[in-house]
Image (cartoon, grey):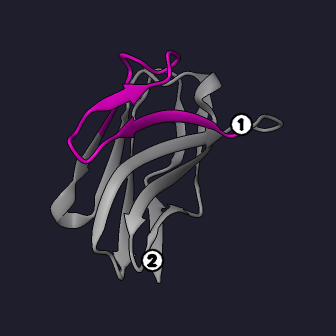
Amino acid sequence: QVQLVESGGGLVQAGGSLRLSCVASGRIFDINTMAWYRQAPGKQRELVAAITSGSSTNYDVSVKGRFTISRDNAKNTVYLQMNSLKPEDTGVYYCNTHIRSTTWDFYWGQGTQVTVSS
């Protein structure tokens, strides 16, 4: 069984910063891509940033230059540093990882709320 637990969300004023963390635990033999998605009210879930096992990264154009994704393989953890936050960044942020437990599967965290006030 694999679990993902996110933390670090909250309420912040526009221009502020937050750092999200997602820790994977359980029967884990390998981790490939780790990613952050977000879902704003009334909208579909969208990819924000992703990082491969080789630390290659890609970002949605709306967050490029403001957000930084990183990972600590020893801790099975992925981070999302969010700077210069805007009200349109508001939403529930979900961690998604490609993990080999008994097989390779994608796992989702429960989500953490980020609210940016204007």
Tell whether 26 sits left or right of 38.
left
Residue 100: x, y in percent?
A: 37, 69
For the point 37% across and 48% down, the residue is 33
| Residue type marked 2 | Val
Write down the residue under mark 2.
Answer: 2
- Of all residues shown, which one is farthest toward the front? 103
Judged by depth in the image, the label closer to the viewer, 2 or 1, is: 2
The image quadrant of residue 65 is: top left
Task: Name above or below for residue 68 compared with residue 5.
Answer: above
| Residue type marked 1 | Ala
- Of all residues shown, which one is farthest toward the right? 42
Instruction: Name the element at disc 2.
Output: strand
For the point 59% across and 32% down, the residue is 116
Task: Name above or below for residue 6 compared with residue 46.
Answer: below
Write down the residue under mark 1.
Answer: 40
Q: Give the magenta range.
A: 45-69
Q: Is residue 21 magenta?
A: no
- Disc 2 to disc 1, how far (Cα)? 26 Å
Residue 19: x, y in percent?
A: 37, 43
